Amino acid sequence: MKIAIAQLNYHIGNFEGNLQKMLKATATAKEQGADIVVFGELAVTGYPPRDFLEFDDFIRRSEEVVNTLAKAAAGIAIVVGAPCRNPVIEGKDLYNSAYFLAEGKIQQVAHKALLPTYDIFDEYRYFEPASEFKVVDYKGCKIALTVCEDIWNVGNENPLYKICPLDELMPQNPDFVLNLSASPFSFTHASNRIHVLKANVERYGKPMFYVNHVGAQTEIIFDGGSLVMSPDGNVHDELPYFEECIRTYDLETVQKGGVHQVQPKEKMTLIHDALVTGIRDYFGKLGLKKAILGLSGGIDSAVVAVLAQRALGAENVRVLLMPSQFSSDHSINDARELAQNLNVQYDLISIEEVYASYEKLLKPHFAGTTFNVTEENIQARIRGMLLMAMSNKFGNILLNTSNKSEAAVGYGTLYGDMAGGLSVIADLYKTEVFALSRYMNKDGEVIPENIITKPPSAELRPDQFDSDSLPDYDTLDGVLYQYIEKRQGPRELIAMGYDEKLVRRILRMVNQNEFKRAQVAPILRVSAKAFGMGRRIPIVGKYLS
């Protein structure tokens, strides 16, 4: 028995595109001598289809693709994920299913039993969980057919479900396990999934073939990294990250084990490649081509500019340098040098005259007041207006350059520097942005060294530095990580040694600025807890605010 894993980049709702991609992969698997080719969870529709699943036409078109694939299942079996209608009136109308197609027709359908409703997942909103479990018989082999979360109740300290689907299937004595996944990227997830699959094969003693998606769907990124596990707990093979790939494996060879080959899992390499993939697919799948951003001479915009250039090509990236009377010469020069290093188009538009006109216009209304954050925000909003004007005129989509530390504590201006069509690094803390900049320069200086080493500053008033308003980033990011990712409260943070007054100040800033984060562009997710769809905090909540 030979099994092909088809790790592909799907497009939500692009039924014809997904179909043609799978038909081509099926032909490749046939050429490789495969008996079975396996595609990912909800591959037909793309993942996550969300409320598209509520449209009958969407489900009908999905069924048409499944039927077309079934006809192509001649001389090879096809296993593919797609929604399936629930014939019972009680319960949800759909299942999240794995179809087994062979000899020109649908032979069997296995439904997902464990439906995640945490973080970015909300599957119980749409799907009914499986209540029956049956192996697939094919060419003398018994196959345990599972979908993504069905194997994730094993190998973790706090199981979320009361059953393990493979426990239900093992009495039928399957020869191997197929798992169709759409498992989103975070920089720790590649290691976590190996741990979970290893726990499964050690528990059940069966080879496992795990196929994942690759590519990005708005803020959710898939890294691929599909796995073949031997019963001895070794990784027989791990497919590439962020690349489409089709590989065929001999079941007998996998069963023997003794082979262990995994890829490096360096944090900044994974994050870099994930963000490049996120930008590229956001633009490509929406039919967009060109990006624009404001280049300030600071670290955040520098990192976003590099990512955009690597994702879209230098010819498709434009940057604006928009100095005010508070901008230092070195920031302007640093920004210009970076633009030249990247070979991207840059324009210099001073906002000093525009800002002066605002001052003059508002002077009688601001009489008796002093310069404060209001005047700082006016500068940020002037820059946002100029960037959006260029975006409207030339069709360049604005990339937001705010980082996670700033987004967390509200250190940004709504409708100013928080504007944009995609938030590129808003899931990276400031300290991680610096680390990513170092990674970008590993093969030679791309980002000028002065951008990396100078003290961070918004340059919205004379001699301004981020440290005037915020704790140092090492401390701030430590508290934010524990609060956001680890859900540690003030008592736990103080017990870790953080100053009580500082802790309460930081947590108050985070919770008071939820209204800002509710208005930002989609954030590319690279951590286990990103702002956006996976973190649901009340805007008007009193807790810690």
Image: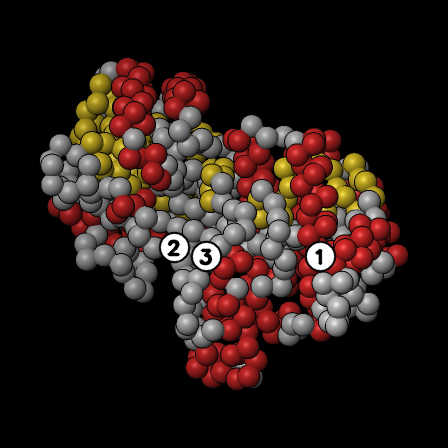
- The residue located at (29%, 31%) in the rendering is 55
**Other residues around mark 3 within 10 Å, as few (<14) / some (14–19) / many (≥20):** some
The location of residue 372, given as percent across then percent down, is: 72, 69
Q: Amino acid at mark 1?
A: Ile
What element does badge 3 sit on? loop
Farthest residue toward the front? 364
Is 131 situated left or right of 68 in this image?
A: left
In the image, 439 versus 394, the foreground residue is: 394
Q: Amino acid at mark 2?
A: Asp
Q: Is residue 313 left or right of residue 50?
A: right
Query: Percent position (x, y) of residue 535?
Result: 42, 57
Residue designated by label 2: 119
Residue located beneath label 1 in the image: 378
Identify which residue, 96 or 357, lies in the foreground.
357
Q: Nearer the viewer, residue 69 or 392?
A: 392
- Residue 337, how many percent across, how many down? 84, 47
Q: Nearer the viewer, mark 1 or mark 2?
A: 1
Cβ–Cβ below 8 Å for labels 3 and 2?
yes
- Compared to residue 233, the image places residue 6 above or below, namely above
Residue found at x 45% / y 57%: 528
Label 1 element class? helix
Q: Secondary structure at mark 2?
A: loop
Image point (54%, 35%), residue name: 281
Q: Nearer the viewer, mark 3 or mark 2?
A: 2
Percent x, y for residue 100?
Answer: 24, 28
Q: Is residue 541 above or below residue 379?
A: below
Q: CA distance from mark 1 to mark 2?
A: 36 Å
The quarter holding residue 35 reads: top left
Q: Quadrant of residue 360?
A: bottom right
Residue at numbered disc 3: 528
How far apart marks 3 and 2 lie (CA) works out to: 8 Å
